[in-house]
């Protein structure tokens, strides 16, 4: 506590001392102000932590979304690749089948054309030289082997030629030759005790065509 002594020419005056309450209020104000500053600092730090957490959550969400997008893109790409592979396999299979069908049809057409040409050539050959049928007769007799030939049926205008051919081929063993008006050039039917053998040119060509068709179908 301070005091002052008045001089001779100075009148004594009273001094106003501050109260304890006012001093306490001053100290309390200083403390309150310091607490406020400390609270502001804590709040700022908390806000910074919250902001950092929010930023990390945003980054994680973006990363998760990116990873999910990549996964979905990979799945979709894999599915599309599988679908494309399946379509390609089907197309190749259909192409192979089409190629085989075209080849078979082309070969079948070649066979039909070749046989048609052969038929025309043989018919023309028999018209020009009827005795060229002798090769067919020999082949038929070899097929029949030891079976007894009872008779041979031919077209009416081929009776004389057939008798001559049989005389040379079979030694004239009494094989009867009869005419059939339903038969044409190159038609020959051998009748035996076991049945008939159709050795006609057209019949043999049809057999050849069926053989080619079976072969092409199996290929």
Image (tube, rainbow, N blue to C red):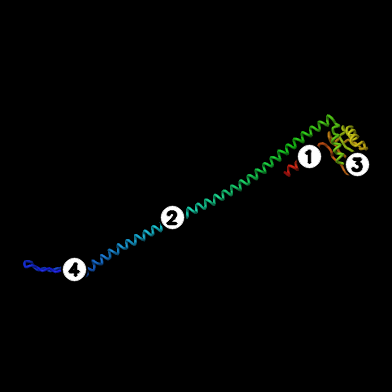
Q: Work out whether mark 1 precedes mark 2 in sequence or the reverse, and give the earlier one.
A: 2
Q: Position of residue 29 (x, y in %)?
A: 25, 65
Q: Residue furthest top?
A: 128
State which quarter of the image contains the C terminus: top right
What is the x, y in percent for residue 103?
Answer: 70, 40
Q: Position of residue 14 (x, y in %)?
A: 12, 69
Q: Residues within 10 Å of mark 2 (few under 14, many from 20)?
A: few
Instruction: Assess whether mark 3 and mark 4 are in contact (beta carbons under 8 angstroms).
Output: no
Which residue in the structure is indicated by mark 4? 18
| Label disc, if present, on residue 208 of the rendered structure | 1
Total marks shown come to: 4
Which of the two labelled residues, at mark 4 and mark 1, occupies the earlier sequence position?
Answer: 4
Marks 4,2: beta carbons within 8 A: no
Considering the image in quadrants, where does the N terminus appear?
bottom left
Point out which mark residue 148 bears: 3
Q: CA distance from mark 4 to mark 1?
A: 142 Å
From this view, report whether residue 170 is shown above or below residue 38. Answer: above
Closer to the N terminus: mark 1 or mark 3?
Answer: 3
The answer to the question of whether label 4 and label 1 lie on touching residues, with beta carbons closer than 8 A, is no
Residue behind mark 2: 59
Q: How far is the residue under mark 4 from the one under mark 3?
A: 164 Å
Question: Which residue is the extreme one toward the left?
Answer: 9
For residue 20, above or below residue 157: below
Give x and y (percent) for residue 84.
59, 47
């Amino acid at each position: 506590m301070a005091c002052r002594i008045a001089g001779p020419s100075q009148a004594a005056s009273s001094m106003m001392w501050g109260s304890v309450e006012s001093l306490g209020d001053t100290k309390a104000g200083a403390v309150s102000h310091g607490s406020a500053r400390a609270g502001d600092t804590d709040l700022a730090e908390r806000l910074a932590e919250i902001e950092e957490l929010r930023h990390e959550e945003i980054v994680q969400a973006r990363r998760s979304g990116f990873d999910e997008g990549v996964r979905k893109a990979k799945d979709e790409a894999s599915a599309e690749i599988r679908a494309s592979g399946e379509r390609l396999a089907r197309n190749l299979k259909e192409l192979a089948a089409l190629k085989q069908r075209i080849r078979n049809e082309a070969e079948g057409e070649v066979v039909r054309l070749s046989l048609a040409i052969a038929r025309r050539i043989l018919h023309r050959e028999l018209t020009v030289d009827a005795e060229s049928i002798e090769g067919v007769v020999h082949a038929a007799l070899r097929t029949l082997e030891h079976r007894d030939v009872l008779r041979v049926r031919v077209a009416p205008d081929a009776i004389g030629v057939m008798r001559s051919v049989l005389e040379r081929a079979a030694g004239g063993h009494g094989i009867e030759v009869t005419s059939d008006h339903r038969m044409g050039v190159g038609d020959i039917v051998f009748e035996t005790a076991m049945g008939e053998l159709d050795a006609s040119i057209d019949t043999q060509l049809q057999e050849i065509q069926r053989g080619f068709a079976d072969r092409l179908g199996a290929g």
